[in-house]
Amino acid sequence: MKNFPITESLVFGAQALERTETGLQPHRLPASARRQNEDAGFSMAERQPSGVRLKFRTAASAIELDVLPTKRVYTGMPERPDGVYDLVVDGALMQQKSALGGRIMRIGMAPPSMVLEPGAVQVLRFENLPAGEKLVEIWLPHDEMTELVALRADADLLPVPARKIWLHHGSSISQGSNATSPTGIWPAVAAALGEVDLINMGFGGNALLDPFTARAMRDTKADLVSVKMGINLVNLDLMRLRAFGPALHGFLDTIREGHPKTPLLVVSPIYCPIHETTPGPGQFDFAALAEGRLLFRAEGNPEEAAKGKLTLVAIRRKMEEIVAQRAASDPNIHYLDGLALYGEADNARLALPDALHPDGAIHALMGQRFAQAAFSGVFSEIGRG
């Protein structure tokens, strides 16, 4: 086995690779944005490498990747599954591995606390790969922080050029919450069907119209940009309708500074029964937690929606109105109703397992529908590489 340096030419989907004492930490926000963020949860989410993968051509029959993962353990909550590393060969999922050891981050909810326990580097070995030269991708876990330490193979690893790039921003639903593997999150499913290279800026709990996120998107090369917004604004009870409209306009204005004519798709929230007409904040269902089940509930008062508290129904209406207004002078902006990805009828047969996040089957459905709407629909010239 020969050692190969892990360089930016082999890593797709990351905004930066930070050198640490152990290896390389992939970041999904550039340093300029990270300096302006003061939220610990956002810092953790952007270090979880959703959509980040190693990608190269090789004739290797065996590849080893050394990683140092960080596992999260939440006090009083069900145990989280280990992160998954997906090996994809010529577009087909071939093997899946998990790093069973590593660091442990113990997180207390009340009072808030965070303790990091040290851990050892883990070795992932992918072997018995198909003969001959092939395109190999190793997708990193979408919901588990990991540092890249070393890369080995029994044949050369050759960089490959990027295809057309799809830059996407959204919430934990876009990051992949409740999906079982990194290639199973809905943006990855859609990107595979559209044959585009994904840069996933879906951040759990943090699709909040932050200006530094908009500037990061402005400065990122892309052939298609999409923004899926709404659920975090409701379940964090962050703003009222009066603030939402101007904030969305400002976010889109910033993106347009760097992408003045790039196709821009604005996507409203998928169906979520607890917040359709009930404002936030959202909260854990502690009675369910006592039974070992993770569920969410809405704690707002539906009557306050008339006073401008945000609901998903109100957000969809406002987003469609804003896109229609902007389209009068911007022919490259489009609106996609999130209910077309997952609606009330879908919820009746495929319910959100925790009342908030899709499971693997719903992620697959959403990815297929997005690809049909975008890469086989209004943006068909972008898809297929």
Image: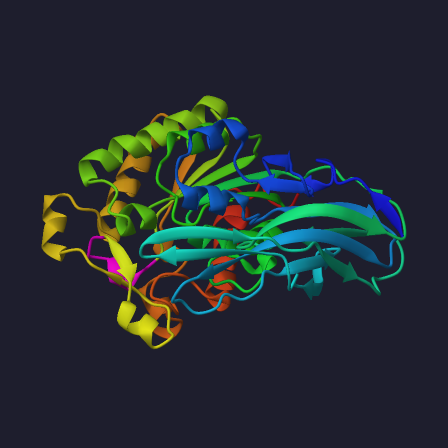
Q: Nearer the viewer, residue 95 or 324?
A: 95
Q: Nearer the viewer, residue 139 or 346?
A: 139
Please identify the quarter of the rendering in which residue 120 is found.
bottom right
- As displayed, is residue 159 above or below residue 101? above
Q: Residue at x 63, y 35 (%)?
A: 18
Q: Residue at x 13, y 56 (%)?
A: 301
Q: Residue at x 45, y 22 (%)?
A: 257
| Observer able to see residue 101 | yes
Q: Position of residue 319 (x, y in %)?
A: 30, 41
Q: Is residue 66 magenta?
A: no
- As displayed, is residue 282 above or below residue 306? below
Which residue appears farthest toward the bottom when viewing the image? 291
Left or right of 241: which side holds 32? right
Q: Is residue 274 magenta?
A: yes
Picture quarter with the C terminus: top right
Q: Residue at x 69, y 42 (%)?
A: 23
Q: Position of residue 229 (x, y in %)?
A: 36, 44
- Residue range corresponding to the magenta coloring: 271-280
Q: Nearer the viewer, residue 85 or 89?
A: 85
| Observer able to see residue 13 | no
Left or right of 26: which side holds 112? left
Left or right of 359: which side holds 71? right
How is the protein colored in the picture?
A: rainbow
